[in-house]
Amino acid sequence: MALNGNHSELPQVLVLLPPACFTLLESNYSHKFNFLKAWDSPLPQDQFLATHAGSVQALLSSANGPTITANILQMLPSLKVIVTTSAGIDHLDLAECRSRGVAIASTPKIFTEDVADMAVGLLLDVMRKISAGDRYVRDGLWATRGDYALGSKCQIGGKRVGIVGLGNIGVQVAKRLEAFGCNILYNSRTEKPFVSYPFYSDICELAANSDALVICCALTAETHHLINKKVLLALGRDVVIVNVGRGAIIDEKEMVRCLVKGEIGGAGLDVFEDEPEVPEELFALDNVVLSPHNATYTPECFMALCELVAGNFEAFFSKKPLLSPAVDN
């Protein structure tokens, strides 16, 4: 199929809802692909899908968009490939994709540097109370109440940081924190022979031996609520938890309860269980830093993401191997 020509003759890419990078993607690649915008159609989604069911072979997805369920896949019998703008693929019905022979391309390494930066930034912010201090100054409290107390154990150097998931992102988080003088511990599906960090197969044991816990793993059936009440209580009152993975890796209700009761030291969160909803109990806590799942929202990241997404579609329509086929863990 030709990758250039009249718009109606271009390869079709179905988009149910636009990912954050879609404006840039469309601006740069509308001459190569005909993006079928389901959200922009006056037709209900099922009717829109039925209209294009016989011709659509490619779908653009994202972790923040609708879940690609078995029902959606069944409505698209000609679908051959899904390209997602996320590293994770937990928003796709993988079993149904496999049974239908639908290939999946993800973006596992595009976000590595930016997410690692965000993880370290959140950890520093919570432990040094940077955002809390900023509010203290802006609210005029420095002048009326005096110096803002950082509290105890706020120095980063020498801290034992447990990393959950020593993949691409986890390794980069570890490298950054080593530069601060932190001691790295980790839990992962398997022990990594290329690092000398202490490995903990038991997540509770890792929590009990850490001054901070950074969640970097993917969301799977095995990691859903991996950080449960038992793990949270193992952390203790002075330990900070940071999550740049997926919200549902932590039992959010239990985490909120622990934070409100002072049973853990603080939290830096870029992801939540029911985005964009965030538990209101967290809003008043100075030991909690909240970010709207924007660890990857940088111009450099978006440009690289668009290039990889477009490259995967070009490879598919040219009958070449996908550039970044997803690994189903």
Image: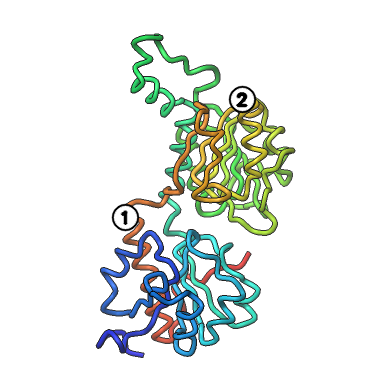
Tag count: 2
Q: Name the residue that disc number 1 marks.
A: 300
Which of the labelled discs sits on residue 324, or is there none? none
Name the image quarter holding residue 98: bottom right
Q: Position of residue 76 (x, y in %)?
A: 53, 83
Tag 2 secondary structure: loop
Q: Please report the residue visible at 58 percent of the width from the left and 45 percent of the height from the top.
A: 215
Q: Position of residue 217 (x, y in %)?
A: 59, 52
Q: Residues within 10 Å of mark 1 (few under 14, many from 20)?
A: few
Which amino acid type corresponds to the residue marked 2 in the rendered image?
Answer: Asp
Q: CA distance from mark 1 to mark 2?
A: 36 Å
Q: Please report the residue visible at 65 percent of the width from the left and 81 percent of the height from the top.
A: 99
Tag 1 secondary structure: helix
Q: Please report the residue visible at 39 percent of the width from the left and 74 percent of the height from the top.
A: 42
Quarter in which the C terminus is drawn: bottom right
Q: Is residue 127 above or below residue 224?
A: above
Q: Is residue 168 above or below residue 40?
A: above
Which amino acid type corresponds to the residue marked 1 in the rendered image?
Answer: Glu
Name the image quarter holding residue 233: top right
Q: Name the residue that disc number 2 marks.
A: 238
Q: Residues within 10 Å of mark 2 (few under 14, many from 20)?
A: some
Sequence order check, earlier mark of 1 and 2: 2
Q: Please report the residue visible at 42 percent of the width from the left and 43 percent of the height from the top.
A: 117
**Which of the colour schemes (rainbow, by chain, secondary structure, one colour) is used?**
rainbow
Q: Position of residue 302 (x, y in %)?
A: 34, 58
- Quick one: 289 or 168, which is closer to the camera? 289
- Quick one: 58 or 234, which is closer to the camera? 58
